[in-house]
Image (cartoon, grey):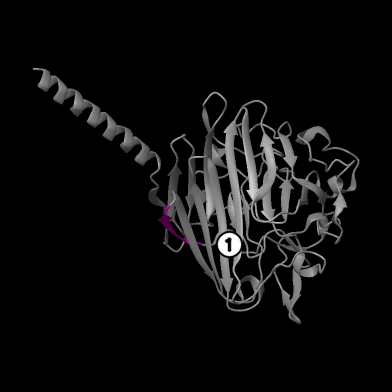
């Protein structure tokens, strides 16, 4: 009788152990499914990445886009923290770069022109802040509007591949690009772009998710508390093109070296804020080798915190100034002004035209790597 009880107990414990490890395995499994079809009939996949703490990231082959990111608040309630769309059809209308991987050159290039090794290149001028045309985020059909090839990789991740042919959107060189999203058990969502070229080119691949840590996309982000690891920023002209200087943030509304409410000084009588209609500038990060903390944001209502680390020299903080309700996103919601923010780690805007800026040139035999880590917590 005792042997029977012992056998049954062992069997129950064994089953419970198997179930426990099955739950852990399932929590770390990447799910893959068809998301929809392109106008030409090409199928596009979406991948769902989870971790054991309940974080859920969805990414798609279209634009190497982060479709959504669900993270818990201080009470453990999950919510999607990103602006975007519910379907591939919606993403095909994406003119705000929600969630996108943008390139070849993220941010702006003055007049859509640059010179490389004595040769002049002309890009599409697809943006005109202040009525001044410039090239923005890679052109008319940048990396955010092409279909990448996705596959599940080790480390609870998904790797997207794309080959940008010589001359695409006016950029020289055949460029081979890989972008990987992965989610670990420290609640870190890692986005990493790597690229090589067969001819000299310029490159600044940028991740462009719009965040609202409340989990309620109708709420303003002006009460979020922001810290930037930057003592300088890049002043611009009316067209939001850097003028080549690095200005100190101390004593200005651009100073986020200490935790500061985003909306506290947003209407200050300050030239940079007038040109950008609020915050839409590149901050120069403190120098350091490898990954370093770039930004920290906290929503005081939900307690959610997002920390961003990178290996790049700058971070663009955009406060959603140009959202105006015309973009109707998830659940048909019209996204209103300043209901989301972007923090885009990057090389300097207009670097190809600014000799004093860190070089944006990639040459054959060199490897480009841009790493960006979003770490989520609640307090």
Magenta range: 147-154
Instruction: Tell me if residue 241 is in the magenta stretch.
Output: no
Seen as rendered, the residue at the extreme top is 1
Q: Is residue 211 visible?
A: no
Q: Is residue 201 left or right of residue 163?
A: right
Q: Position of residue 144 (x, y in %)?
A: 58, 58
Q: Is residue 322 left or right of residue 150?
A: right
Residue depicted at 58% across the width and 62% down the height: 143
96 vs 139: above or below: above
Residue depicted at 87% across the width and 52% down the height: 247
Q: Position of residue 243 (x, y in %)?
A: 86, 60
Viewer-nearest residue: 330 or 209? 209
Viewer-nearest residue: 163 or 327? 163
Instruction: Tell me if residue 152 is in the magenta stretch.
Output: yes
* Picture quadrant of residue 5: top left
Seen as rendered, the residue at the extreme front is 2
Which residue matches tag 1? Answer: 143
Q: Is residue 361 visible?
A: yes
Q: Report crowding for label 1: few under 14, some 14 to 19, many 20 or more residues within 10 A (C-alpha).
A: many
291 vs 328: above or below: below
Q: How many marks?
A: 1
Seen as rendered, the residue at the extreme bottom is 118
């Amino acid at each position: 009788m005792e042997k029977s009880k012992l056998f049954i107990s062992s069997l129950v414990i064994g089953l419970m152990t198997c179930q426990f490890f099955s739950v852990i395995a399932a929590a770390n499994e990447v799910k893959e499914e068809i998301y929809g079809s392109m106008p030409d009939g090409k199928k596009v996949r979406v991948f769902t990445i989870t971790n054991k703490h309940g974080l859920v990231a969805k990414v798609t082959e279209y634009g190497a886009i982060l479709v959504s990111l669900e993270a818990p608040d201080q009470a453990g309630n999950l919510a999607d923290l990103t602006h975007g769309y519910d379907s591939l059809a919606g993403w095909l209308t994406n003119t705000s770069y929600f969630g996108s991987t943008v390139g070849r050159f993220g941010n702006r290039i003055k007049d859509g022109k640059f010179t490389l090794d004595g040769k002049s290149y002309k890009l599409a001028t697809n943006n005109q802040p202040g009525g001044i045309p410039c090239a923005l985020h890679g052109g008319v059909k940048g990396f955010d509007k092409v279909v990448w090839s996705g596959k599940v990789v080790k480390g609870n991740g998904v790797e997207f591949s794309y080959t940008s042919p010589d001359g695409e959107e006016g950029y020289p060189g055949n460029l081979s690009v890989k972008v990987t999203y992965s989610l670990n058990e420290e609640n870190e969502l890692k986005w990493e772009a790597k690229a090589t070229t067969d001819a000299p080119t310029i490159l600044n691949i940028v991740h462009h998710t719009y965040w609202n840590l409340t989990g309620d996309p109708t709420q303003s982000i002006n009460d979020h508390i922001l810290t930037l690891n930057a003592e300088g920023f890049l002043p611009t002209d009316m067209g939001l093109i850097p003028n080549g200087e690095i200005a100190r943030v101390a004593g200005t509304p651009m100073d986020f070296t200490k935790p500061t409410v985003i909306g506290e000084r947003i209407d200050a009588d300050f030239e940079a804020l007038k040109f950008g209609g609020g915050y839409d500038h590149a901050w120069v990060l403190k120098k350091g080798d490898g990954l370093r903390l770039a930004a920290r944001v906290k929503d005081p209502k939900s307690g959610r915190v997002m920390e961003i680390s990178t290996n790049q020299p700058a971070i663009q903080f955009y406060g959603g100034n140009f959202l105006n309700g015309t973009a109707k996103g998830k659940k048909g919601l019209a996204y209103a002004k300043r209901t989301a923010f972007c923090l885009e780690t990057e090389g300097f805007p207009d670097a190809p035209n600014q000799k004093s800026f860190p070089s944006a040139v990639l040459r054959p035999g060199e490897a480009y790597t841009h790493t960006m880590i979003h770490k989520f917590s609640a307090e």
